[in-house]
Amino acid sequence: MRENLQHLFETTYRELRPRAPMPEFRVQFYAFANVNSTIRLRDGIMHVRVSDLLEGAPESIIKAIAHILLAKIYRKPIQPLHATRYRRYISSHDMTAKAHLVRQVRGRKRIESASGQVYDLDEVFEGLNRQFFYGLLARPQMTWSRSHARNSLAHYDPAHNAIVVSRVFDDRRVPRYAVEYIVYHEMLHLKHPVKLRGIRRRVHGPEFQAEEKLFPQLEDAKAFLKTL
Ligand SMILES: [Zn+2]
């Protein structure tokens, strides 16, 4: 996805500036509290942040944003086609509701960083992603909880698309396999969204459980969790 983003910005740049040298693009989805996107050119590198609320948007919408941002920074006229496309998408009911929800939640809860004192959650996620998921899971926001909560060790938070891990795990006395297990478990929640079956929610269905057993130090990890 990231490469595709980069490519979209490069082709849009070419359309706007056919002969100018191509800057290096660093484009990422970013957890803004709204549908903002920002662009800035610094030392020849174009830094672009696109609101992660648009992460699932169709390519034509990302293309429209690329056009609008680049036209702005180079003071070129914005093509009405792109302006309209973008405006329609943003004002569609879903987007406004989603933005509103996220604003509410983010307003209360500050997104924390992935790198702790001992463990870096992004790095833990990517290692597990390669080992168990062919690197195919899209990484959500990985964050350490603000407090050392023991009642909630970790959870996946769909409103932020975030995996939040209790800070009790960011400790030299905690073995790496315990952190990996806790993150792996939440990654399985990403892979197996909760299905409704009748009235009962199957949070840890049979497929989920079978896949969890693939974790090599499952027993050790579970034993360690009991000591917390
Ligand atoms: Zn679970």
Image (cartoon, rainbow, N blue to C red):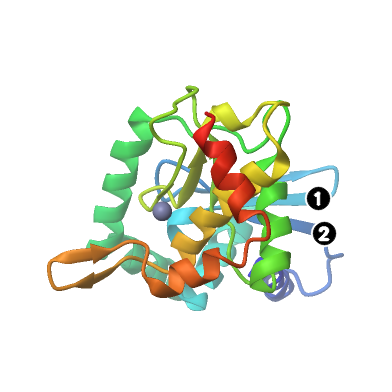
Callout 1 amino acid: Ile
Most foreground residue, 6 or 31: 31
Image side of residue 179 versus residue 205, left or right: right
Q: Position of residue 223 (x, y in %)?
A: 56, 42
Q: What is the crowding at mark 1: few (fewer than 14 residues within 10 Å), some, or many (at least 20)?
A: few
Contact check, label 2 and label 1, Cβ < 8 Å: yes
Q: How many marks?
A: 2
Q: How far separated are the C-alphas under marks 2 and 1? A: 6 Å
Dividing the picture into quadrants, the one containing residue 184 is bottom right
Q: Which residue is mark 2?
A: 23
Residue name at image x 41 percent, y 66 percent: 86
Examine the rendered structure and indicate whether residue 165 appears above or below residue 45.
above
- The answer to whether one can see residue 55 in this image is no
Q: Position of residue 106 (x, y in %)?
A: 38, 36
Most foreground residue, 43 or 184: 184
Callout 2 amino acid: Pro
Image side of residue 146 versus residue 151, left or right: right
Most foreground residue, 196 or 110: 196
- The answer to whether one can see residue 170 in this image is yes
Most foreground residue, 170 or 9: 170
Q: Which residue is mark 1?
A: 45
Disc 2 on helix, strand or loop? loop
Q: Position of residue 144 (x, y in %)?
A: 55, 34
Q: Position of residue 191 (x, y in %)?
A: 48, 68
Disc 1 on helix, strand or loop? strand
